[in-house]
Amino acid sequence: MVRTVVALALALGLAHVASPARAEEPTLELKQAMTSVQPAAIVAPAPELQPQEQKAPSQVAPAQPKAPEPAKALACNHPGALGTSRTITVSADAFPRIGTMQYRQSLPLNDHEVVITFDDGPLPPYTDRVLDALDAECVKVTYFIVGQMARAYPDTLRRIYNDGHVIGTHSMHHPFSMDRMDAAQLTSEIDGGIAAVKAAIGDGRAVAPFFRVPGLARSRTLENFAASQSLAVWSADEVADDWFHGIKPAQIVERAMRRIEAKGHRGVLLLHDIHPATAMALPVLLQELKAKGYKIVQAVPAGYRPASVPERTPAEIAAARHQGWPRVVKASLKGHHARERKHIAATGDEDSFLAKLAAKKRHAVAAADSESGFFNR
């Protein structure tokens, strides 16, 4: 009897000792799990720590922040819209020079794929009209921005980016003489333009390392400088002559479509968002591309880009624009056009100046597209 009582007591004692041990095991595991989770929960909201953590958990900062954009395009709220079929990542290493108007290489596009690009802006209200047309068709494009225009219209620039388009640069003052510039002048125009666009957009990471030469006036010196800055130099595969003085919207559409189809039904198309004719032509051009079975591809830079940049309130924007919009001529009245500016002020002969300006650009692009201009490297 005594032995039975002792055995029973020992058994109860061992059970009592073992029970807390078993109860503590999950508690320790839970504490360890909470310890491992808490730092992520604390660190993630801290803005200053996010860039350091972006490579760790994929959900904090994806390797390519543009990944959500194809989903946005596919989920377009406009039934029957043209849309953006895909993106293509462009780096200066893989694509140092782009566009068969001047180079051997362009983007690797499939049959009936087009990349649309715009130069010289922003300039309201025409840039706004272009953005509205792109949004109606859920089309994403690439812009090449002039530094002084970015300074003048930062709110339009930020809208471009927040609408899902890519921002490249197009020099500081849009000179047509960059093929004759030395290294110091190129630094001023190229780096100055990049700095101005970064300042205007509010986040330097939003600016892609894409550069297009004004008038496509390239040179070896310029291309070597761009390579040293890891900039992809863009030419084009097709132009629509939309900078011609007096060109009609229907002519822009016809020339764009004819040249795209002549270049193997694909290519990088160069347009300008600062002209009223282009703004009027774009909705028709997008409809024509859709009717003929074309797909839109957006070129995006490699690496991280912010999802959006801060915008001012409508009241702040209205106050900033209180002085009104400029005439289109102001988009190209830079540097070497100072004498023409004085002439316009004295005579009011704006049409004459625009005709001369269009002739200069026509000559520059014609030289780029001539037989002797091809593959002269």
Image (cartoon, rainbow, N blue to C red):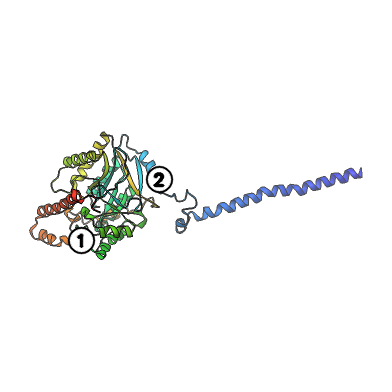
Q: Position of residue 153 (x, y in %)?
A: 26, 55
Q: Position of residue 8 (x, y in %)?
A: 85, 44
Disc assigned to residue 267: none
Q: Is residue 44 left or right of residue 143?
A: right
Q: Is residue 38 visible?
A: yes
Instruction: Identify which residue, 185 or 55, lies in the foreground.
Output: 185
**Farthest left residue?**
347
User: Mark 2 Cα within 10 Å, few/some/many (few <14, many 20+)?
Assistant: few
Instruction: Identify which residue, 220 or 98, lies in the foreground.
Output: 220
Disc assigned to residue 180: 1
- The image quadrant where one finds the C terminus is bottom left
Q: Which residue is label 2 attached to?
A: 67
User: Mark 1 Cα within 10 Å, few/some/many (few <14, many 20+)?
Assistant: some
Residue type indicated by callout 2: Ala
Task: Tell me the element at label 2.
Answer: loop
Q: Position of residue 152 (x, y in %)?
A: 25, 57
Q: Earlier in the sequence, mark 2 or mark 1?
A: 2
Residue type indicated by callout 1: Arg
Instruction: Identify which residue, 228 or 60, lies in the foreground.
Output: 228
CA separation in Å, label 2 and label 1: 40 Å
Callout in the foreground (2, 1): 1
